[in-house]
Amino acid sequence: MKISHRELSGNTRITSLASESLGNRAYIVESSNKAVLIDPPLASWAIENYLTQTGLKVVAILHTHIHN
């Protein structure tokens, strides 16, 4: 899984998690130790590891379409 970050204004950033083998990409919008997950994959171990490492608390999950 490839992870990249984009800093926005203030303490907000977007983290992209790309599963290149499946062609899927999930996003985490982070701010003030809270996270919104966008299109997380069904096999969410990479996202769970990232959230544990960063200490983020998930406050919402948004699905725009089905992922593998």
Image: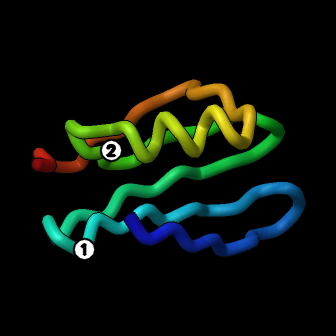
Relative to 62, is 51 on the left or the right?
right
Q: Nearer the viewer, residue 52 or 11?
A: 52
Q: Position of residue 2 (x, y in %)?
A: 43, 71
Return the residue at label 1. 20
Residue at coordinates 57% horizontally, 62% vertically from top-left? 15
Amino acid type for the residue under numbered disc 1: Glu
Say which element carries label 2.
Answer: loop
Q: Position of residue 49 (x, y in %)?
A: 53, 39
Q: Residue most toward the right?
A: 10
Q: Position of residue 24 (x, y in %)?
A: 22, 64
Question: Which quadrant does the N terminus fall into?
Answer: bottom left
Question: Going from the N terminus, do you reach mark 2 or mark 1 first?
Answer: 1
Return the residue at label 2. 40
Relative to 25, is 60 on the left or the right?
right
Closer to viewer: mark 2 or mark 1: 1
Residue at coordinates 78% horizontally, 36% vertically from top-left? 33
Q: CA distance from mark 2 to mark 1?
A: 14 Å
Q: Nearer the viewer, residue 5 or 48?
A: 48
Say which element carries label 1.
Answer: loop
Q: Position of residue 25 (x, y in %)?
A: 31, 64
**Eyeballing the image, is 10 above or below 49?**
below
Residue at coordinates 58% horizontally, 45% vertically from top-left? 50
Relative to 8, is 23 on the left or the right?
left
Amino acid type for the residue under numbered disc 2: Pro
Q: Quadrant of residue 44?
A: top left
Residue at coordinates 75% horizontally, 70% vertically from top-left? 8
**Eyeballing the image, is 7 above or below 68?**
below
